[in-house]
Image (tube, rainbow, N blue to C red):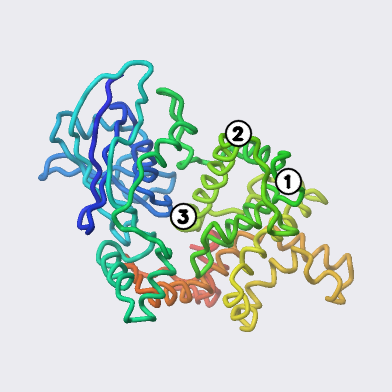
Amino acid sequence: MVVYEVRVSLLGAEPAVWRRIRIPDDAHLGLVHMVIQMVMGWENMHLHEFEGGEESERVRYGPIDGDEDSPDVLDEREYLLSDLLREPGDRCLYCYDLGDDWQHEVVLEKVSEIGEDDDPLWCLGGSGACPPEDCGGVPGYLMLLESFKDVLDEEEHKAAVQLLGEGFQPEAFDCSVFNDQVKNRFSGSRMRAVAEVEPGEEFLMELQEFLSSDALPEGAMSMLALDGLFSALAVHPVTIMPSRWLPLVWDMEAPGRQPDFASKAEMEKGMGLIYAYFNAVVRQLTNDPDNYLPLCENLQFEPGEERLQAAVDWSAGFLLGTMIDEDVWTRTYGDEEGRRVMTPFALLSGVFDEESGVDENEMLAMKEDLIDELGGCVLDLQEYWQPWREAYLAEQGLNRTVRGSRQPGRNDPCPCGSGKKYKKCCGGGDGG
């Protein structure tokens, strides 16, 4: 098998952040993206692009979906690493997070052949810890490191420690972390891009099997509740680390009970499935919210009790995600508009069943009507929380570059002049 040895360097980072990896020359660019995410330490939460070719004729490659409106971006799934790099010294760019603009230079250093017993995908060396997501690109990261070292400015230092972690070491990197992941996820030349999963039926069945396995406590989340939780976290104004939401996954009823995995391999496989699905939900709501649907709608249950129960389960998980940060929850529910956008989820989850005073049949009818509106309700909450998210990032010194003009909010007046809200007119697919 022909393999490349490439060096991936994060441009502008100080101390230097780089990795040297072995990878098959015929790896498609979608897989190369996933490998870079894993070996660098990114969380695969944002858009990315490759750029290659001669200086006068640069070509861009990236993920393409059915609504792609950038005809100058080629589908990365149809191109191989060898289409961009052929001879030692060839180089291309990989940009992650088109707002923070993390530019990586990928340089081909060596072309060789390996035997059947050799690992075609391997980390050979590297240095430098991966910066945190959403920290303002290289300039923001450098400022963050300065604040981390400056103990005299107590407020800035505390914010940096909160984001980086108490024991953060900017020069630290361990190849074995990536290589252990590779051993679990890949077998020889048969590679499956777990982190770039499109959650189809087979994947969902595998994840549901894990969630219902004997390794997890009895109160572990269902697939539907998990999708609700991840949807809430994807639109939440505050970045919630896995250490805060994983206990809810393991046990919705009594967070604190831990899984009892039979082996390290079982643990790594299950965690890989959970993180892959989390990334998929976040990507959908970040990059293509207009086509977002909750899982309880995607599965297309027949009208009736089963469909209603699916929506109830989903809403329970979503509500847990919205309540995970006490300050955000208190502020949201203490605001009239916040209560309005939160009410559909509380209603469907059953919070108001006993105290609403509404007739049981009338309550049932209200819930059934809400099911078809769930996706829009999530986008309403995302829009409500968006200014908070921007303020949160600014407070952390993590200002993001916003490209392009602002689209009308779902509750804004429609720009067509109809007098209706945008979501009930052109934004709902029925207008124009």
- Tell me where residue 176 sits by quadrant: top left
Q: In percent of the image, x 64 and y 69: which residue is there?
A: 323
In the image, is 335 to the left or to the right of 253?
Answer: left
Q: Residues within 10 Å of mark 2 (few under 14, many from 20)?
A: few
Which of 158 and 286 lies nearest the eye of the viewer?
A: 158
Give the residue type at disc 1.
Phe
**Residue 163, image x and y in percent?**
42, 66
Q: Amino acid at mark 3?
A: Asp
Of 370 and 212, nearer the camera is 212
| Residue 78, horizontal then vertical, whole percent | 34, 32
Residue for badge 2? 202
* Residue 109, above or below 290: above
Q: Label 2 is placed on what type of residue?
A: Glu
Q: Quadrant of the N terminus?
A: top left
What residue lies at 40% left-to-right and 74% top-to-bottom?
A: 159
Q: CA distance from mark 1 to mark 3?
A: 24 Å
Point out the tag, 2 or 1, that comes first from the N-terminus.
2
For this rendering, which residue is in front, 325 or 160? 160
Q: What residue sits 75% from the left and 58% below the top? A: 312
The secondary structure type at the circle numbered 3 is loop
Q: Which mark is residue 242?
A: none
Label 1 environment density (alpha carbons within 10 Å; few <14, some 14–19, many ≥20): some
Q: Residues within 10 Å of mark 3 (few under 14, many from 20)?
A: few
Secondary structure beneath dot 2 equals: helix
Q: Quick check: 382 above or below 357?
A: above
- Vertical relation: 234 (above or below) 250: below
Q: Which residue is the site of mark 3?
A: 288
Whether the residues at callouts 2 and 1 have beta carbons within 8 Å, the answer is no
**Residue designated by label 1:** 301
Closer to the chain start, of discs 1 and 3, is 3
SS state under label 1: loop
The mark that comes first in sequence, 2 or 3, is: 2
